[in-house]
Image (spheres, rainbow, N blue to C red):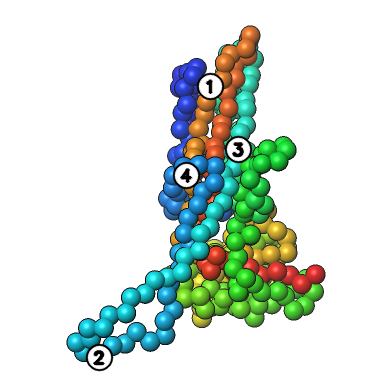
Amino acid sequence: MFKSNNLTAGESISLAKEIVKIGISDTPLTSLILAKGLTEKANGTIHTWRERSFDTTADISVPEGNENVTFYQSGRAEMNNVLEIFQKGAHVSGTANAINVLGQGNIFSAEVADRLIELKVNMEKQATKGTKNDGSATPFVRRMDGLEKFAHADNLVTGATSQIITEGEIKETVKKLWLQGLPSGEYFGLVNADIKEQIDALYKNSYTYTQTNVFGIIVDVIRTNYGNLNLVLSRHASVDKMTVFDASTLSLAFLREAQFEALAKVGDSIRGQVIAEGTLKVASKKAVAQYTLKA
């Protein structure tokens, strides 16, 4: 992936393709968005868009030959998110860089690859549950709102029993998106380990084995009358929440896609950085529902 002869001084090397393929198990949300090609170009430190919505007029039937055309316009709220800068540096001594470790190759290239994985993991954390900050106050660090902050007020479900999720509540959460008129019927549910274990337990008597040497009770997809819920385990999701979303309404907007930049050599050390600047875009809050465990 990285070759030492590519790391020339003063050159920026795009890592946009590499970042899609690495660290997938620990970055399920950003990996899903990137793998679907759902990225766009931002053009400032605040990315602004109009919310995607549909007109809900109940009766649009007309008589034959109707000449009195009624025109409709969806209400589109203005939405925005803050672009966050992610940066990781790498530097090695000239001696270390000259050593070719068996099975690893160039040390500096390996360090850059590791820093890129760490950058993506941090981006995943912020895209999942970050809290918006425009960076106007000290320490002047801009931060994005994560997906968990985008659930529409009408799409919130709270558990009835303390620290217990039920099958009915899972269906109720998916139904919230169905009631909003979303056309896809294919949803993803981002959950941490505690809620995922509870969901697995709900269906412990409803599973089959496809291989005789693999055993376990893991629920990947729940089919409901309101659409399929694909469960995505994430260590970065809040422990008390399940956030359900239509992936087609998400995208990552980048002012600067992930890239490597060589930094000035200081003495007998080689230096560089991986850097990206972007934010999460949610086309409509109506496409995000959220279940919260009762405390």
Which residue has dot 3 on it?
Answer: 86
* Residue at position x 34%, y 84% in the image: 60
Which residue has dot 4 on it?
Answer: 42
Q: How far apart are labels 1 and 2 at the CA level?
A: 69 Å
Q: Can residue 85 be seen in this view?
A: yes
Q: How far apart are labels 4 and 1 at the CA level?
A: 24 Å
Specify few, some or many for label 1: CA neighbours under 10 Å numbering under 14, 14-19, or 20 or more.
many
In the picture, measured across the screen, residue 111 lies left or right of residue 57, that is right
Which residue has dot 2 on it?
Answer: 63
Mark 4 is on which residue type? Ala
Specify few, some or many for label 3: CA neighbours under 10 Å numbering under 14, 14-19, or 20 or more.
some
Mark 1 is on which residue type? Ala
Tell me which label, 4 or 3, sits earlier in the chain: 4
In the picture, measured across the screen, residue 184 lies left or right of residue 288, that is left
Tell me which label, 3 or 2, sits earlier in the chain: 2
Residue 110 is tagged as none
Count of marks overlaid on the render:
4
The x and y percentages for residue 41 are: 44, 44
- In depth, the one of 121 and 53 nearer the eye is 53
